[in-house]
Amino acid sequence: MPQFVDPFTGVVPGRKMTDSELARAIRFNLSAEEEAIHLYMAHADATDNPLAKRVLQDIADEERVHVGEFQRLINILLPDETTFLAQGADEVNVMAEEVKGGQAAPGLPAAQAQPALGQAGVSAPTIGDLRK
């Protein structure tokens, strides 16, 4: 299991958690789901049994759905979360463009393609850029 500090270890706190505390607890759940996906996919890759492969991949896919559920809940509990996720996605899009020589990244519409960092007048985006 994840190496994060588990604040509960099977004990319900004596009070209700704040949304911020709940979001931290859900991040722990999210990491457990990611670890489960890794484990089930590794087991599926390690066998030639077609039924076992199918069952393990199906379970891994169910865990991926859980990841989406937990992430959406975090986005609701922490209103600034989507801003940080968007910033990270934008940073990867810029790097992908650099690697492809200025081409738009797969899945990124050409209209959203941006010049690569380091070109004349191009600097790294900031959170303030997201507010525009």
Image: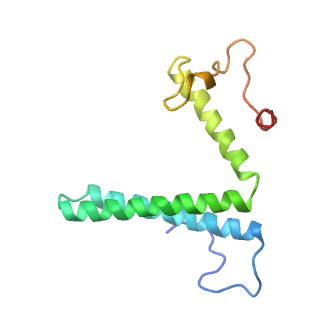
Relative to 117, is 93 above or below? below
Query: Horizontal placement of 61 versus 18: left or right?
Result: left
- Residue 114 quadrant: top right
Q: Residue at x 71, y 46 (%)?
A: 84
- Residue 96 quadrant: top right
* Residue at the outermost top position: 120
The percent coordinates of residue 4 (x first, y second) are 60, 66
Query: Horizontal placement of 14 versus 116: left or right?
Result: right
* Residue at the outermost left position: 49
The percent coordinates of residue 115 (x first, y second) are 64, 18
The percent coordinates of residue 60 (x first, y second) are 39, 61
- Residue 93 quadrant: top right
For the residue pair 111 and 35, the one nearer the viewer reads as: 111
For the residue pair 45 and 4, the one nearer the viewer reads as: 45
Q: Residue at x 28, y 65 (%)?
A: 55
Q: Locate the C terminus by quadrant.
A: top right
Q: How many marks are shown on the rendered structure?
A: 0
Relative to 128, is 48 above or below? below
Q: Residue at x 73, y 30 (%)?
A: 125
The percent coordinates of residue 43 (x first, y second) are 30, 61
Q: Residue at x 21, y 59 (%)?
A: 47
Coloring applied to the structure? rainbow
